[in-house]
Image (cartoon, coloured by chain):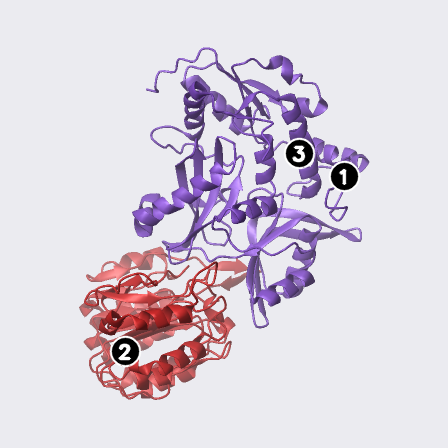
Chain colours: A purple, B red
């Protein structure tokens, strides 16, 4: 059984999308711990301004901000919110006007402007932070925003001496990419949407002499003199540099982050990286994500690997060092938990953090000391509450 | 299929070596030296010099070489030049493996090899030699020349594309001690061009009297090779025949099945193949250890049958 939880006063306020798997799993974890269900505020209501959060807060409320999930409506609303937001970097990325968005038909897999989505999401998170000045939160809007900015997050980790792949300064086209690569004598990179999630909008590209090769989840389709981006579940391999340039140029209309493509280690005929969930400062739930392609993200139908055997090959000292790196990285943030994409080098000797995911704790069924991620997070909250150390949403970094 | 790094070579465990590490026990292990050009690591050249500077490195019997730099497009030339330059430090070695890279580190066809014959002059005591990379005109080819090597017991060429000239050189070489011959022939898409005729001397002449293991792997001509070897007296001396990773189907398998000498093998390795399920069952009645795992089904593209060797690109 679960440890006896005697926190009758605590109640959770959850910002998420009704019916989303993450919301359900969190509520189930509360029920298992004999805690009352969280009060759910939907993103849609929040965006519409219909939720007076301040009225809902009590001194014992704990706020948890969940991923907006896969809700198409929420994505549209955030894009619409973003349409009115000026871009602090200047207007160099793709935009859709609110009127276009209002009539835009839904197309499966289509990638809508991710920078604009991020501007909308940022506006919402700022609004949220302003409404929760003194609330206790499991995760902080400022952290979530930084983790949804791959460039910014990479820079923060790098500044703090945490091993990350070397990155390029901002580039805006394939030609700029090639100039930048030749200057550094690099021949292999991962190019990702700065504000994308999982493998959305990524391309792994390498060349040797006049041979080019890229793996991507993106398809560029010409449409009425312009082009549109689509996400594919099946990884495409490209070998013509013209075709690769077309994808890179299309992605550059969003904001992109480019870093060296570190070779992944091989295990049992597949390559892998790791997802490590750090909760309350401790690396806990960990899975190996095996793949036949350079993209290991789980929603691309990849399978979980035999972690025990992989750990044994890495060895206890290096394993601990990697866990420590994940914990150090998480300590740069105020949030209670993060999901970290961790890579070992091909020789299993070194490690680097590829990404930090604000909502990277969705690992259904994975137990650490008999607890799933949600249960471990709630128990961590309760123990920290005793010491009154949860972060406040207005914490300034 | 993704090739992993060598975990064993020449009967010993391969252990990655880095500056600061002790030289591992030379009686049971072989160090692997690989560059990590990502991040703040010493370059491969620095690592190699530091390795040689440790006097204990003189006790090792072999070396496995991983990637040197980010790109493998001058791999063979660069490595051979360095090895020849340091001949005094490595001339005693009996085991060398070059090109130990996974597809994430480099596609096999992007690992350029070139002329490796100076290595055999540099290391006259070499007993085990293996190399992975492009052995065709798709890159700069692979050249052994005609070897005269009294001690060589193991010769391995792992490639996704073999040029017939490599086969010709090897089969004209004087390798009286050779016990393990492993040649991957690869895919025409990457300029592999060998045919079964190129292997004829191996099957008809007693070239390598001590040969116990023959691997003709990753081959689009696996059926032809299976049929030819079934007719060959060479089979009588082998303990292990390895036709894995290629296009072998029932045509080649039935020749093996009907060959009495096959039943005297210790092991027949056919894993990754295109045989029917029925044929797999029949092969399992041979009474020897037969690996028929990883059965493949051809793809059909516009009605045309497509097969793939396990490693090509």
**Which residue position holds label 2?**
B231
> Whole-percent x and y of residue B7?
30, 61
> Whole-percent x and y of residue A248?
66, 56
Q: Are marks 2 and 3 in contact (CB under 8 Å)?
A: no
Local SS, label 1:
loop
At x 36% / y 82%, what residue is drawn? B84
Q: Is residue B94 visible?
A: yes
On the picture, is B146 further left or further right than B37? left
On the picture, is A55 further left or further right than B123? right
On the picture, is B142 further left or further right than A105? left
On the picture, is B238 further left or further right than B3? left
Local SS, label 2:
loop
For mark 1, name the chain.
A
For mark 3, name the chain.
A
Q: Are marks 2 and 1 in contact (CB under 8 Å)?
A: no
**Which residue position holds label 3?**
A121
Depth order, front residue of A221/A208? A208
> Whole-percent x and y of residue B297?
43, 57
Up/down of B29 relative to B94, above or below: above
> Whole-percent x and y of residue A78?
69, 33
Q: CA distance from mark 3 to mark 1?
A: 13 Å
Q: What is the quadrant of the C terminus of chain A in the image?
A: top right
Q: How many marks?
A: 3
**Which residue position holds label 1?**
A86
Q: Residues within 10 Å of mark 1 (few under 14, many from 20)?
A: few
Q: Earlier in the sequence, mark 3 or mark 1?
A: 1
């Amino acid at each position: 059984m679960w440890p006896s939880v005697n926190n009758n006063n605590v109640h959770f306020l959850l910002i998420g999308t009704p019916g989303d798997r993450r919301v359900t799993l969190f509520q189930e974890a509360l029920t298992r711990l004999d805690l009352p269900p969280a009060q759910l505020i939907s993103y849609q209501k929040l965006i519409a301004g219909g939720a007076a959060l301040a009225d809902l807060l009590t001194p014992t409320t704990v706020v948890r901000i969940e991923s907006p999930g896969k809700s198409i409506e929420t994505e549209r609303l955030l894009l619409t919110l973003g349409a009115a937001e000026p871009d602090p970097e200047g207007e160099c990325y793709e935009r859709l006007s609110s009127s276009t968005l209002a009539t835009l038909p839904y197309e499966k897999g289509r990638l809508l402007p991710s920078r604009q989505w991020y501007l909308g999401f940022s506006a919402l998170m700022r609004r949220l932070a302003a409404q929760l000045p003194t609330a206790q939160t499991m995760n902080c809007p400022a952290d979530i925003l930084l983790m949804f900015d791959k460039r910014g997050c990479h820079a923060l980790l790098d500044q703090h001496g945490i091993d990350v792949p070397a990155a390029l300064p901002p580039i805006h086209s394939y030609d700029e990419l090639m100039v930048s690569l030749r200057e550094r004598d690099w021949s292999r990179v991962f190019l990702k949407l700065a504000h994308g999630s999982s493998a959305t909008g990524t391309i792994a590209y390498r060349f040797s002499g006049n041979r080019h090769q890229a793996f991507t989840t993106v398809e560029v389709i010409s449409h009425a003199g312009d082009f549109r981006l689509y996400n594919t579940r099946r990884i495409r391999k490209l070998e013509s540099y013209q075709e690769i340039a077309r994808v890179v140029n299309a992605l550059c209309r969003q904001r992109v982050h480019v870093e060296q493509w570190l070779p992944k280690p091989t295990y049992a005929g597949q390559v892998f990286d790791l997802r490590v969930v750090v909760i309350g400062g401790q690396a806990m739930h960990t899975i190996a994500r095996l793949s036949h392609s350079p993209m290991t993200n789980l929603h691309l139908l990849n399978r979980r690997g035999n972690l025990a055997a992989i750990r044994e090959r890495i060895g206890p000292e290096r394993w601990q060092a990697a866990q420590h790196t994940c914990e150090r990285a998480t300590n740069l943030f105020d949030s209670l938990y993060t999901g970290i994409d961790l890579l070992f080098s091909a020789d299993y000797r070194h490690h680097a953090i590829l990404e930090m995911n604000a909502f990277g704790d969705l690992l259904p069924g994975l137990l650490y000391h008999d607890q799933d991620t949600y249960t471990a997070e709630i128990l961590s909250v309760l123990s920290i509450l005793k010491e009154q150390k949860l972060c406040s949403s207005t914490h300034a970094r | 299929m993704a090739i992993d790094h060598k975990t064993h070579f020449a009967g010993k465990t391969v252990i990655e070596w880095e500056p600061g590490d002790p030289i591992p026990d030379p009686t049971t292990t072989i160090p692997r030296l690989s560059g990590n050009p990502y991040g703040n690591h010493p370059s491969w050249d620095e690592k190699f010099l530091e390795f040689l500077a440790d006097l204990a490195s003189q006790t090792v019997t072999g070396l496995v070489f991983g990637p040197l730099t980010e790109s493998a497009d001058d791999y063979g030339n660069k490595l051979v030049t360095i090895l020849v330059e340091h001949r005094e430090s490595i001339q005693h070695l009996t085991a060398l493996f070059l090109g130990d890279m996974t597809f994430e580190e480099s596609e096999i066809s992007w690992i350029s090899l070139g002329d490796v014959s100076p290595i055999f002059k540099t290391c006259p005591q070499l007993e085990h030699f293996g190399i992975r990379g492009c052995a065709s005109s798709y890159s700069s080819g692979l050249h052994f020349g005609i070897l005269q090597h009294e001690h060589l017991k193991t010769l391995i060429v792992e490639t996704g594309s073999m040029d017939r000239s490599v086969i010709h050189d090897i089969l004209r070489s004087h390798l009286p001690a050779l016990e393990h011959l492993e040649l991957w022939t690869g895919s025409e898409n990457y300029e592999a061009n060998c045919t079964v005729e190129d292997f004829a001397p191996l099957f008809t002449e007693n070239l390598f009297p001590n040969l116990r293991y023959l691997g003709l792997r990753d081959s689009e001509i696996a059926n032809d090779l299976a049929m030819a070897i079934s007719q060959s007296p060479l089979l009588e001396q082998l303990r292990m025949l390895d036709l894995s990773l290629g296009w072998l189907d029932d045509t080649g398998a039935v020749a093996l099945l009907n060959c009495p000498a096959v039943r005297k093998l210790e092991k027949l390795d056919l894993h990754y193949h295109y045989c029917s399920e029925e044929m797999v069952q029949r092969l399992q009645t041979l009474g020897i250890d037969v690996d028929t795992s990883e059965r493949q089904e051809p793809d059909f593209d516009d009605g045309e049958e497509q097969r793939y060797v396990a490693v090509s690109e």
